[in-house]
Image (cartoon, rainbow, N blue to C red):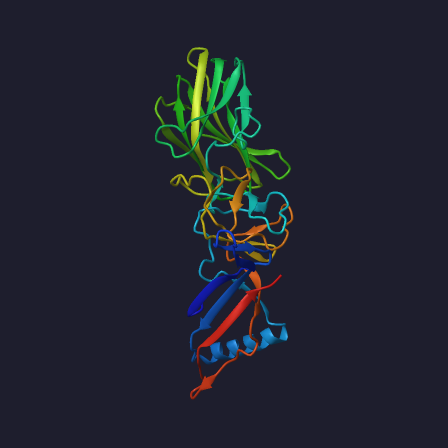
Amino acid sequence: MPRALSPSVQAPRSAWRSAYSTQRETLSHLGHRLLISMTLPPAIDRRLVAEREAWLASLAASGDWVRLPAFHRPFPQGNASGALLVSGAVAAGASAIALTGARPAPSLMLGGSFEVDTDANGRADHMQSYITGSTGAVTYEIGPPLPGATGLRSQRITAATLGTASGDAIGVRQDMAGIIPGRPYTMAVSVLSATACGLRLYWDWMAADGTTVLGNAQTTVTAPLSTARLTHTATAPVDAASVRAYVWAQANPVAGIAQINLDDWQFEQAGAATAFAGSPVLRAGDWLGIGGVLHQLAADVQFTDAGTAASCALVLPARKAIANAAPVTLSRPTGTFQLVDDSAGVAYSPGLVQGEIALSFVEVF
């Protein structure tokens, strides 16, 4: 980390004073560039001194080009992680980009809640229906958050008639990849039932070819009539590559209407449930690396789930076009910069003490 750091922006613009209003008016043009000015502290360690000397000499040999991170903020302030991708091609000069694939924390495979129902089928985008046995008409709805839950929306599932046989069930399921055999995993979900019925959390561990390796189930419990947090923990078996996680209501004591409400669903690699991480978020000021260019966010961005794109406002317009599905770097992103003055060098004092070195870089593409 430099001893002193001054990030700034080179913004090409035209300025004039209006002949009518006498106000000063400006017009921005494309061609914004990031500037980084830094000061390296004095050094006395012989190895560090030699490394600096070699680095500065190599800059001149490479045309003074170097990749630099955002030294002052190498990691995002928000909790978003995962394999983010750009959703849709972005033209140079665009003021925003859309991103998809965000997760709320490194250990979570699924987080958030049930906020988005793009196709208006009553189910959250990342959920599939699960209906078995002699059930009547089943409806799915996105509703308000459950009391005491932290999600923005909840998932409601209602059966006009749910039978008494053990195979009669209504619910939802979610498929998640990236399982590591031998590791413990925990699922937690907030539940509120409007009627008396049994409730079960169930997993199918799946091999890479899609076949079921093993099923794990939580013991059936009575669905709570006030919001409760249910959890289930199991260890991924050998050959497991993904998991199909279910929550379902089953086997009414008496056939009739059954309804369950779900919120704050979270699945993580952990031996016990942790606090609900909420929807993944990036904060204003966070840096993204896309195609070798650093982009800074102008405002907070909240993602609803990993499959839904979120629009991200940029501090500077996109300095070059971005391809659809371009990968996004959140951790230690870097951009390409050029040394402004290649006359910079080391200055020694008695004892081979290297003094401060002031350097300025401008962004290049």
Above or below, 303 relative to 224: below
Along the viewing direction, whichever of 156 and 136 lies nearer the viewer = 156
- Tell me residue 350's x, y (percent): 43, 88
Res. 145 in view: yes
Along the viewing direction, whichever of 136 and 22 lies nearer the viewer = 22
Above or below, 39 relative to 145: below
Res. 165 in view: no
- x 42%, y 27%: residue: 144
- Tell me residue 8's x, y (percent): 48, 62
- x 39%, y 41%: residue: 274
Quarter of the figure that contains the C terminus: bottom right
Farthest-out residue, bottom = 350
Farthest-out residue, front = 20
- Tell me residue 202's x, y (percent): 49, 29
How many badges with numbers are in the image?
A: 0
316 sits to left or right of 226 = right
- Tell me residue 104's x, y (percent): 46, 43
Along the viewing direction, whichever of 303 and 23 lies nearer the viewer = 23
Quarter of the figure that contains the N terminus: bottom left
- x 42%, y 20%: residue: 198
Along the viewing direction, whichever of 164 and 36 lies nearer the viewer = 36
